[in-house]
Image (cartoon, rainbow, N blue to C red):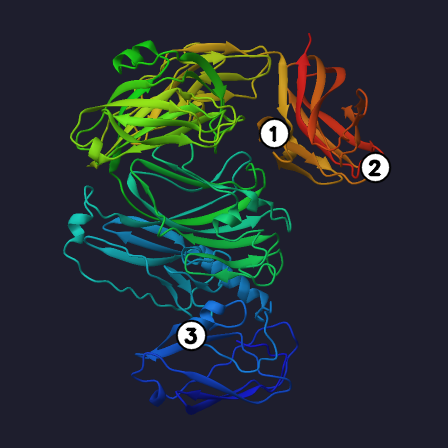
Amino acid sequence: MYDPSIGNQKAKVLVNGTVASEWSSGSAVPAGAWADETLVLPASLTTGKSSITILNEFESSDLDFNEFRYDVACLVNGEWTRTNTVDVGPNHPGEEQAHGYTIGSPTFQGARAFSYPVDAQTIANSAAVLDGARLQIIFDGQTAVDAPIGEFFGSGLGKYDVRALMFSIDNSSTDGWYTTWWPMPFARSAVVQIVNGSGIPIQGGKIEVRYVSDATVATRLKPSGDLGYFHATYNRSQPATQQDYVFLDTTGRGLFVGLTHTMRGTQGSSRGYLEGNERVYNDNILSPAWNGTGTEDFYESGWYFRDGYSGPPDTPYSRPLTGNPAYNPGVEGFTNDTTGTFRLLLAESIPFGQRLRFTIQHGPVDDVPVDYSSVAFWYGQPTYSIEVTDSLNTTDVASRQSHQYTVSGDTLSSLSSGFSGEFNYIPVTLGLDTASNAISFRMAIDPANNGVRLTRISDQNQSYQTANVYIDGAYAGQWMEPWSNPDYRFLNDPFDVSLNQTRGKNAISVRIVPLVGLTSTTNTQFWTASNYQILSQVPAFTTAQAPGPIANLAATGGQTNSVTLSWEPDSAKAGVAGYQVYGSSTDPTVPVTPANLVGQTPVPGFQHTGLGLEQQWYYRVRALATNGQVGPISGVVTARTGNELKIEGESLVATATATAPVVVQGNCCGVIWSGNAQLWFQASTVGDNMVLTINVPTAGTYDLSAVMTKARDYGIVSLAVDGSQLGQSFDGYNFPNVTVATVDYGSVPLSAGAHQLTFTLVGKNASSINYLVGIDYLLLTKTN
């Protein structure tokens, strides 16, 4: 590969000291495109050798002889196969060193960001085939791989060069190989096929599969064996606001080992989707075991892939375990900013014994519209290796007694909050035990265990809760949670106990001795827990056990048009994956029918929103196990909604017509908005306006108020309802902090149905630097 804008580049090529050929580029061409030149070296100089030494000797040029990359292919059995690649220059010191590359008296060292001159239709056809033609692999009668070719081999945006440890795309020629080296065990049969759904005919191709026989594999692949089937699970979706994009959500046991990920923005050149964090949930524990710091960080880059591993801005790269092989800012067939990535988790593969849920945010609080696709690579079996053997409710008298729970001087209370992570917006209410003295209890385990995991649901309002843990009187380690989260206070965290202390036992006695936190600034000593659960690691098993009955179900109404439900965490042998909530405002018996299913929640809580005003609702709940079994339906609870219609600002973005962009903005700048987001009107001048449509369920007179954002770059805005001015204009300026303020716009009669709210920029504070508007939520209180 070379820059052809410099013409007549000539150099002799020597192989192991013998002249073999000559580079000759020809006349110069306009700058801005790459060119490739190919030489066929004599077989007499290469046959029988595993490596050769190449020497280029400069002869002549209009300026100089440049080189950026070399690809080596060998002709074996009539077929050319790429065997090596060398990227040279200051961005690739490792490759230069690995290949013994040296250059004498260079006149230039740097990088070029060019492209190959390919017509638009060829690019479109190639992208369509790589997206629409699917690789399918069937092992022992079960389809385990079904994914678009491009995405499976590392690039969902088209044919880009990929050189990962477990797969590659050879972009050096039009017939380059797509290769994968994943081990794919099977017991009886394997079928590999390509199903072309692209609409573009595939003129030809070849599939080459290499395998070796191993007489032990058939036994090891049994449901009780120690091998898992290889899977490549494809997903594509446009996740909604407040919903993570899901790479994989599967049950059973196995290992997650990597993924490819294609991110298609929907807002021009904006890359705000890269603010999202990846999250991993293992074995139905309600807090993520892995919670990242940003999408580009997960792919081991940073600053929105700005330097592409020290190259020019947004330079794609492909490395053994991570890569950003494709990037397009919204040109050459792409409407919006797009990013293609992969990450292999070979050293840090993620095990699971009941369930694995691996997701990623799209934006800081799932607030940036996107079109995502991915392929998740994993090994698995449909059996389980993690068994729930016992559960303890620390505030329930019967549970405390049955588990011999003892503690002195503890305090029982109730906490309403959320679990930090993907489901933080769902309110949960649980009892809580807080203690400063030693806590003792006894819990059942499986004697065939290979170790157990003790989990607790705690209040992480204060950091560095620390305790020594003793199992049957022997020290087992220190349990510490260094972080605090005053906004989403519930934490479900684990403590692992070695099989040396648990193997062969039917039960263990646990003693937890709270300590002063290691860096506590208040010198306090306490420990919080709402619930303890024991997970035993056991030989592979299957189970048809259903979850238990729902305990302590309660429904709470309030001032707004919503109802909040709470109950105790349930349990099942294979773990509880979630809960189904049934509700009705017309039938107090709440029949368990699809029409009455109002939602499903992964946590022991649910908020039913968007209801009518002053309306009575009735509810029943049941648990869902990881194995698909459902628990018994609960009894009926009831609650009444209030007279306040609460409308989240971000929910109105889809209704907006405006003279400037109206988008969802997630929590930022030190403020946490209701629902973790606000409506953000990016006005920039006096006269900018937006029209929002709201729906009123009941006719009446309403007091209308709004919680609005204030900051140093916000303007002065007026409000009209159905064309009539309401209340006073609101000045959104505040310095230095971002904050919110409640604005009372006054009373207005409204009929049932749709109404239009028009916000118009009428000016700005003399100190403000812009005309932005932010709406956290609207509140309409019915007064008659």
Q: Residues within 10 Å of mark 2 (few under 14, many from 20)?
A: some
The residue positioned 48% from the left and 48% from the top of the image is 298
Q: Which residue is mark 1?
A: 672
Q: Amino acid at mark 2?
A: Val
Name the residue nearer the viewer: 382 or 692. 382
Identity of the residue drawn at 55% across and 11% down? 615
| Disc nearer the start of the sequence (1/3) | 3
- Spatial CA distance of label 1 from label 3 is 53 Å
Position in image of residue 671 (x %, y %)? 63, 30
Asked which quadrant contains residue 133, the reply is bottom left
Above or below 773: residue 781: above
Q: Position of residue 696 (x, y in %)?
A: 65, 19
Query: Contact (CB < 8 A) between labels 2 and 1?
Result: no
- The residue that label 2 is drawn on is 686
Q: Amino acid at mark 1?
A: Ile
Secondary element type, mark 1 = loop
- Helix, strand or loop for disc 3: loop
